[in-house]
Amino acid sequence: MEYLGKTAYRWLGRMSPLQQFMFALAVAGHALPNFAMYAENAGRGKLAVRLRGIAEAMWDDLGGKTDDFADEAEKSLAALRKEVTEDGSFGAEAALNALDLMENALEASTLRSENPARVASDLSFDIIASAEATRKGEPLSDEELDESALINAERDFEIDLISFIREKSGGPKHERLREMSDADGVSNIGISLK
């Protein structure tokens, strides 16, 4: 299912590598509460602190404040993935999905991925569809997904990101993108720890 529509997908495909990184990182940041929920429920809050540190380094890179961080971030993400996979506590799947999005954003920052913005969008919508299916107890039809409040909220969020990234403003955008990504602390699947 094409959640965003053809026009928005065309915009994603036309973004520069920097714009692709901006979009992928903002979408990944939107899923961080999912990881934090897992870490809190598993009694492993330090994992969430570590992931937040990686995200901060990526935002700093976007703002031109860091030098090469990618190798260390890649190792840290791999270590987090191993710990979450081995644990398997409640929320581990949502945490792994958040890691998928962060790894995609990291690949976008190092130009190792083709169309990471589209990958981030598709992955986030798939995560929401999976969460909705879990809540319902069975997969949702395309019509049901199209009516999902979470799908519609993500669609609006991503279209707002695209519009903001495409604006021809003179100043840096990373701080505003960071605020948009935070979405008042509510994740793409509706998790809030506030």
Image: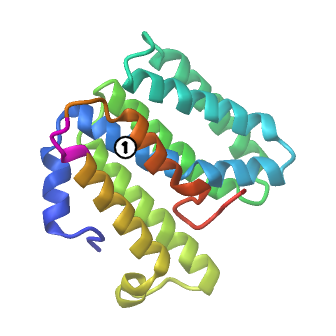
Q: Residue furthest right?
A: 43
Q: Quadrant of residue 20?
A: top left
Between 154 and 133, the one lying in front of the other is 154
- Answer left or right for 151 relative to 38: left
Whether residue 52 sits left or right of residue 142 in the image: it is: right
- For badge 1, the amino acid type reads Ala
The image shows residue 123 at horizontal and vertical percentages of 41, 57
In percent of the image, x 80 and y 40: which residue is there?
A: 45
Residue 45 higher or lower than 12, as above or below: above
Residue 48 on the magenta span? no
Give the answer, above or below, for where 191 lies relative to 133: above
The residue shown at (48%, 45%) is 179
Viewport quadrant of the N terminus? bottom left
Rendered location of residue 156, percent (x, y)? 35, 67
Point out the stretch of residues depicted in magenta.
Answer: 165-169
What residue would you read off at disc 1?
24
Tally of numbered tags: 1
In the image, is residue 166 part of the stretch drawn in magenta? yes
Q: Secondary structure at mark 1?
A: helix
Identify the image's colour scheme: rainbow, by chain, secondary structure or one colour: rainbow
Query: Residue 157, located in which quarter of the rendered image?
Result: bottom left
Residue 192: image x %, image y %? 67, 61
The residue drawn where x is 68% and y is 30% is 50
Q: Residue furthest front?
A: 170
Q: Quadrant of the C terminus?
A: bottom right
Q: Residues within 10 Å of mark 1 (few under 14, many from 20)?
A: many
Q: Which of the two residues, 164 or 76, is positioned nearer the viewer here? A: 164
Seen at 55% across and 79% down, the residue is 133
